[in-house]
Amino acid sequence: MSHRRVSARDKWSRKKWFSVYAPPAFGLKEVASIPAFDERQLINRTVEVTLYDLTGDLSQLHIKLKFQIKYVDGDKAFTQFKGFELARDYIRSIVRRGSTKIEGFFDVETKDGARLRVATLALTLKRCKTSQAKAIRKIMGEIVTTRASQLNFDEFIQEAVLGKIASEIFNKAKKIYPLRRAEVEKIKVLQPPPVDLAEIVKKTLAEAEAPSG
């Protein structure tokens, strides 16, 4: 048993620690530190954080982000956005009895060729008619699809995560029936944009280090 403990300890000691960074669109902020024997063990691993971890804003604690490691340089691991969702406790806290919960699920493509599955949510003040719920769901689909076609991957994700798309849905859908809230509830990346993450990281870091003025 002692030999097994020593072996396990020796095995652990041979691991290196890698710093994990958020995607360039999220500021390349360090979000985690992960042990591994070599970089091959890191590729495609998923790291989960909240938007609060990136911004320090407590009001964004319920926004959960998934980043996937795609590029390793030395002891630095860089990620690509994989998805996001609102915490279940948050969803439960905003749903009320006597209102209608309207959900929509849409597969969309961004201007730069990324394919995404987007889940949206609207909550009415009181129960609405089936026809009104259908009309609101149609508005959701139109807004999500249109914005995706107008924006590149990073721009669309930013608008979704920060609430701009939800705000657009709310303002248009409330004309059909009074709403209490609208949300982009979840995004799953079906196919990322055809970009070279290593080149984007290098360019972003070079721009950050360049003297201003």
Image (cartoon, rainbow, N blue to C red):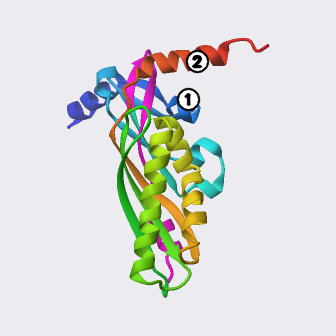
Can residue 87 be seen in the rendering of this structure? no
Q: Magenta stretch?
A: 69-96
Residue 191 lies, with reference to residue 209, above or below; the image says: below
Mark 1 crowdedness (10 Å alpha carbons): few <14, some 14-19, many ≥20: some
- Residue highlighted by disc 1: 28
Amino acid type at circle 1 is Leu
Q: Quadrant of residue 88?
A: bottom left
Q: Which percent across, then down, holds residue 209?
A: 66, 14
Image coordinates of residue 55 in percent, x first then y, are 63, 44
Q: Is residue 94 visible?
A: yes
Q: Residue drawn at (35%, 24%), measured in percent from left and top?
A: 15
Residue visible at 53% across and 74% down in the picture: 176
Rendered position, 140 above or below 17 = below
Which residue is located at x 42 percent, y 67 percent?
Answer: 137
Determine whether, in the image, residue 29 is placed left or right of residue 119: right
Q: Pointer 2: what residue?
A: 205
